[in-house]
Image (cartoon, rainbow, N blue to C red):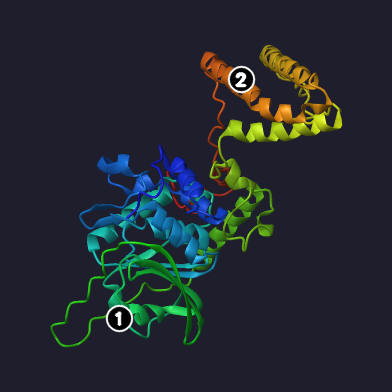
Amino acid sequence: MGGAVSAGEDNDDLIDNLKEAYYIRSDLVERAFRAIDRADYYLDEYRDNAYKDLAWRHGNIHLSAPCIYSEVMEALDLHPGLSFLNLGSGTGYLSTMVGLILGPFGVNHGIELHADVIEYAYQKLDSFIKTSDSFDKFEFCEPSFVVGNCLEIPPESRQYDRVYCGAGVQKEHEDYMKNLLKLGGILVMPLEEKLTKITRTGPNSWETKKIISVSFAPLVLPKHSTNGKPKTVPLPKYEVRSLQELARICIRHTLRVTTDGGDSQSRGRGSSFSVGRGLAVAGLHKYGPRFKRRRVHRRHCNALVLATRQVVASSGIGPAPLDSNNNQGVREEDEEEAGEREVRRQMRGSRRLGRGAGGVVEEEETVEEEDEEEEQEEEEEEKETGELLRPQPAVNILRERILGLPLPEPLKMYLLYYREK
């Protein structure tokens, strides 16, 4: 299953394609997908295939196609503090993305049939926590996995707000799956060759929605026990956090909110998912090509200027004040380059103004050619100077803040989750 969108050159490119095809529709899901590189969950020799919209299997290790995971994440309607159960948790890729949204006070459990896949999932989870920059940009609900058949969960087990099954469910097991849900919960599973969303609206009432056609391997049926007693699989334990863990969560959250500008409380449904400027600066948003964004903005401004027959200084950017450091030579070069660019812009602006009051429509048609001309000039400048025009990766501000705290080194490392970088 898959192949619905074009392959990407990297993870961001793949997400762009999923957005264009309308598989990813919400900012929350987009941020989670961008935060975790799909290739990190592939074996090294197969990483070249990671950004294709195709399922991948090697032995017992399996990943569904990106378009399927996108539809699942959107259908689950996740937000901080929910409980989530992943039936057939596999590599942990989906559970890790879900954990970025649930936040530290959610519940993130998974059941996987194969012990070797559980081991692989924990290796990938450990690598994400220790090495990924995204771990410091989100408040994370770490997943817990157990080995077993998901059809052997005891009937008295706890229920969940959100449940996903990653294998084809036979019609006779539909009610079994529904009973895993809390009232108001959402179940997403492949049922009769359709990815299906089921919402529990009452103790015995449900709403069902078919999402897309899919092809999944069916659930593996439990084997008969030798002693005649039915075999059961205990779910992961729900452990109350220690005061020490809660203090770490609180300190990191406070530093992160300060880093994000203190306005994350006003965004979204909760504060467990750090959104806003902090994530944007970190490069987790990708709103499209840099030049395209600038072109759309300039076209709007130029049309407005011509329509009113007034020259408006829309940018308001002037030379920065000189500082007291010995950087005069560098500043002079920068000012000279800025002056040359400004001269080019003024020449283009004068050509545009010369078209008169009736030139708004003409301006709309010709401004893109001139913007492309400017892009080519900037690309040539980049080649000549070696200067990168794309934004550079942001510094891990949360880490820097923690390291700057007046605390003993062991306590700083505890706040950093003993991360290596």
Which quadrant of the rendered structure holds the N terminus? bottom left
Residue 69 horizontal side relative to residue 248, left or right? left
Which quadrant of the rendered structure holds the C terminus? top left
Q: Position of residue 202 (x, y in %)?
A: 51, 84
Asked whether 251 or 268 is in front, the reply is: 268
- The answer, for residue 401, to whether it is visible in the render is no
The residue that label 1 is drawn on is: 172
Residue 97 horizontal side relative to residue 91, left or right? right
Callout 1, which amino acid? Glu
Hey, which residue is sitting farthest left in the picture? 226
- The answer, for residue 380, to whether it is visible in the render is yes
Residue 274 horizontal side relative to residue 52, left or right? right
> Which residue is painted at 20% across and 55% down in the image?
59
Asked whether 274 or 306 is in front, the reply is: 306
Numbered label tally: 2
Q: Tell me the element at label 2.
A: helix
Nearer the N terminus, badge 2 or badge 1? 1
Callout 2, which amino acid? Glu
Q: Position of residue 84 (x, y in %)?
A: 44, 69
- Tell me if mark 2 has few (under 14), some (14-19) or many (20+) residues whose alpha carbon lies within 10 angstroms of its own: few
Q: Tell me the element at label 1.
A: helix
> Which residue is painted at 41% across and 57% down in the image?
69
Tell me if residue 64 comes above or below residue 380 in the rendering: below
Label 2, label 1: how far apart the Cα atoms are: 64 Å
The residue that label 2 is drawn on is: 373
Q: Quadrant of residue 249?
A: bottom right
Q: Position of residue 41 (x, y in %)?
A: 34, 49
